[in-house]
Amino acid sequence: MRTNQPKTIHLSEYKVPAYLVDTVDLRFELFDEGARVHSTLSVRRNPESAEGSAPLALDGDSLKLERVAVNGDDLAVGDYEETGGQLIIAKVPAQFELAIVTWVEPQNNTRLEGLYKSSGMFCTQCEAEGFRCITYFPDRPDVMARYRTRIEADKSACPVLLSNGNDVEKGDLDNGRHFVTWEDPFPKPSYLFALVAGDLVEKQDTFKTCSGRDIDLRIYVEPRNATKCDHAMDSLKLAMRWDEDTYGREYDLDIFMIVAVDDFNMGAMENKGLNIFNSSCVLATQQTATDLAFQRIESIVAHEYFHNWSGNRVTCRDWFQLSLKEGFTVFRDSTFSADVGSPTVKRIENVTLLRTAQFAEDAGPMAHPVRPASYMEITNFYTLTIYEKGAEVVRMIHTLLGPDLFRKGSDLYFERHDGQAVTTDDFVKAMEDASGRDLTQFRLWYEQAGTPVLKVSDAYDAEQNIYRLTIQQSIPDTPGQTDKKPQHIPFALGLLGANGEALPLCFEPGQDARNAPTERVLELTEASHTFEFHGVAQAPVPSLLRHFSAPVRVAYPWTREQLVFLMSHDPDGFNRWDAGQRLAVDVIQSQVGSSDATDIEPRLVEAYRALLNDTGVDQALVAKMLQLPSEAYLIELADSPDVAAIHRTREQVLHHLATSLREELVACYHRNSGGGTYELTSESIARRSLKNNALAWLLMTNDETGRDLALAQLRDADNMTDRMGALRALVNSDYAAERSQALADFYDQFQDDPQVVEQWFSVQSSSDRAGQLPQIHALLTHPAFDWKNPNKIRSVVGVFAGQNLAAFHNPDGSGYAFLADQVYRLDDSNPQIAARLVSPLTRWKKFAPAYSSLMRTALERIRDKPGLSDDLYEVVYKSLEG
Ligand code: TRP
Ligand code: ZN
């Protein structure tokens, strides 16, 4: 068991850097046995620092120091100190040249931060603190420098040598080696540094910017993936155009590169001019990727590209400001996806993620504000709160200001801060100054953790035709934060009349209803507000928090009647979906503990029947509405959830729906199958989604027609969405023989494609039929499984613990013990992944006692591991103590 605690870093202790670096000159000698890194820095004292003659302290991690010299003079051992992850030089001049040589071993780097090898190729990951695994450096984002990078390697093993910026020189060296030199003219923080060296092929294209410059676009992949880049390239060009049209932002270098690597801790990385991607977030063909994967690739390519302005040109002062770049960039990429696809569907997907996972995070032991006040290990703070809630916060600013003032604000932000490392407060200030709006109270969204709860009640006064709506807000306590202040919340609403008509919203008695809007954004700033709507001739049905105008929970005593009404009448598509979800949640919750399926709410069945029959409405919305709330969401909503009971009940309701709607499902299947060539339009995506949903439901009831349709679809499909849809439906059915056969055939066919094999793992790990523990163990010893590859680990261990909830929460505790075992073993090779994987255990306090004590035991075993990493320490300790 570990006795010393990792250091806690506090925002309140921020100090400007004592030294600045103007230029970084790097020379990498890459060999099979390791890499020698020569770094030459021009360093000067920071005039703004109070610590005039402080020692120079550089960060370093797992480095072998070979040389350190100041102004050309080698330092003797007594002139510097290597201690606690730092290189400290006590006496340095006010301005000097610092030369450092380090030796690192990328081939043994399993943490995948710094310089490492993936499928034989050298690559880097420097965010957040990986650059210090390459060389000693003031590794903090407010030190921005211009980089020049020379890479030397064996020409046949590494014909392609890439780094940030433009290539300025190349040539051959002795012994079959060669070099390329890259120069990046834009000052950048060290976390945006990147290097790639390997045997890669490129897909090339060009983009003409709005000012007429031609940009050279390249996607580099291993030769076997050469045919899988088209979609990413199309997405990139779409994103570049969109950023010009929407934000007036043009790309700034002459070349933009993307590289796909198989071993990667996260989705992708926005390194200046050289984005590095997890293969699964860039490679796709119709035959190998599902619609979901195509959409994910489109949004991640856009996300990383958008960072070029929101993150790179204007970066973060310190890591507490992470949401400055991530929240804003997620907001930008989700607006982009909405614009190029179906806005309602995109909003539904965002909100589903937020309500299922971010709300859970905000209610758990790791809850933190969008701008955290402290951390131990920054990689633990790449969270849904920073990304998704952070994006919602920016979205609320957009709602409060309106599109034109928001654009003015973003222009001012870029104009003021181009080339700087700034804070979330600088962002809000630019929005304030450009719009004239006071966002003082709004800033609490960055400071207070926890999901606000809005308790809504209403009363209709038939005599005076007044409808009164009372909204009370409260914010639950979170670790270290109590007694929170009310926040500034934009609350969009409408009122519906008995026939579904949108009623005018008049705040004043006698106001002319013809000019009154039918949707308004109320601004909540106090603990309680009552709004009066005049001239309301009948008791209305309120449509609350339209398009999810704020990341809050709404509690209102809807009747099932009202929900059914909103499902078919609300002019806001998002709220139609939301009403359907609320109805389904209510039905499932009231059914938990009952074994009698005959009393399942008939209005739910009829509402779904109406949806299945209504071919006139947006089929993309229908496809979403037909998906029942997930187990994870039902668990999130419950106090002391009994997971087994929730699982059983949800299945029971699903089974009841599928049985009652059998004919409609078969008709829906046929109506949406066939239909010509594969397209990626929202209409075709909706058709495939409807068809595959219908198939999954049919197979829930052991329907033979369903089984035959699935088998035929698996055989004949011309795309992975349909193939995977059929496979998933079979795997989750009781047709055990067909399931095994289908899984075996599928593997035979696709075993050479890692991205498909990952999906094949996931489909099993997420299934309560195919993913019980003995089967999961078998997957871990499968030849395609690889303990060094995060994608494989996530697709088996992560998916099991995050999606196969009944098996993970097996009342005997075996699922928890299993996860603890895997986390324990991974902590030595890849602590970042271990700390992310442990997350399902951290919410132990939420569960019914029989579950929570077993979860706690599993966590304690991890806590007591000798040599526990800082990453895992923080998560495990905070969740045991918080
Ligand atoms: N900045 C990246 C993004 O959101 C995130 C990222 C990629 C990352 N790789 C990482 C964060 C490794 C921490 C560690 O686009
Ligand atoms: Zn990002």
Image (cartoon, helix red, strand yellow):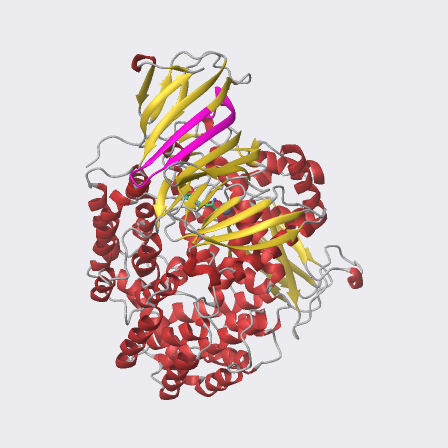
Can residue 536 be seen at all in this image of the molecule? Answer: yes
| Residue 795 or residue 785, whichever sits in front | 785
Q: In which quadrant of the rendered view does residue 90 lie?
A: top left
| In the image, residue 305 above or below residue 870 | below
The x, y position of residue 726, in whole percent, is 40, 77
Residue 545 in percent (x, y) is at: 58, 58
Give the answer, above or below, for where 242 lies relative to 670.
above
Magenta stretch holds residue 188:
no
Q: Is residue 474 visible?
A: no
- How many numbered marks are there? 0
Foreground residue among 378 and 109: 109
Q: Quadrant of the N terminus?
A: top left
Residue in the foreground of this view, choosing between 59 and 145: 145
| Residue 260 or residue 615, whichever sits in front | 260
Part of the protein shown in magenta: 14-40
Q: Is residue 552 left or right of residue 481?
A: right
Dominant secondary structure, magenta: strand
In this rendering, position of residue 263 left or right of residue 14: left
- Residue at x 56%, y 74% (from the top left corner): 684
Percent position of residue 778, x then y: 22, 64
Magenta stretch encompasses residue 25: yes
The residue that appears at 50% across and 12% down in the rendered structure is 94
Q: Position of residue 565 (x, y in %)?
A: 58, 73
